[in-house]
Amino acid sequence: MSREHGRAQLPHVGQRPGISPEEPPASATYDRWVAVALEPHVAGELAEGTELDPSEHPPIVRRVVFALDTANADDLVESFPVYLVRTRLAEELIASGLTGFDVADAVVVPGGPYLDLGHPLPPPTFRWLKVGRDSRADFCVSDAHLLVVSDRAYSLLSRWKLDLCDVHSA
């Protein structure tokens, strides 16, 4: 997957990767939406106060406290097994009608590197993006624990800052 200006260049919707968009053969279309796998930047870590059950894999999380390492984080970040989105992005996702996720509160605190770099306080606000496992939804977590989104979801997300997010065809 090539990257240009910090954005991944994905195949056109309904087109298989590696097929020229100028003359795609009739067999190039998918029967369903194009899936995109995202590996968001790990911009911090789950901090003291996070409530999770490590006896399950992935751990069951009940409350998120996230220690953010940088004020320049992408609008979608992760710390296994949690995904977080900036508050404005969360609001757009809620209004979008996309499926497969819920948005919940998360506490974001400055991590050590954040403080060491002298970033402004308080840190930016994020919301917890709780993603399900239904592969027919616009958002899901795969068996390999990757965030997989539909082309519709990626179209929305790609308008936001995802400079450090690895993007692959799923």
Image (cartoon, helix red, strand yellow):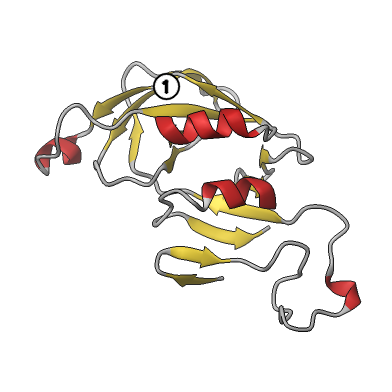
Choose between 12 and 36: the one closer to the eye.
Answer: 12
User: Is 98 on the left or on the right of 129, as rendered?
Assistant: right
**What crowding class fits label 1: few (fewer than 14 Cα within 10 Å), some (14-19), or many (20 or more)?**
many
Q: Quadrant of residue 136?
A: top right
157 w.r.t. 131: above or below: below
- The residue under the point 18% across, 38% down is 114
Residue 168 on image: x %, y %: 59, 61
Q: Position of residue 124 (x, y in %)?
A: 28, 32
Q: Nearer the viewer, residue 156 or 61?
A: 156
Does any portion of residue 28 appear in the rendered image?
yes
**Which residue is labeled 1 in the image?**
64
Q: 138 or 115, which lies in front?
A: 138
The answer to whether residue 57 is visible is no
Q: Amino acid at mark 1?
A: Val
Position of the C terminus by quadrant: bottom right
Residue pictured at 33% horizontal, 28% vertical: 125
41 sits to left or right of 170? left
Q: Secondary structure at mark 1?
A: loop
The x, y position of residue 10, in whole percent, is 61, 66
Picture quarter with the N terminus? bottom right
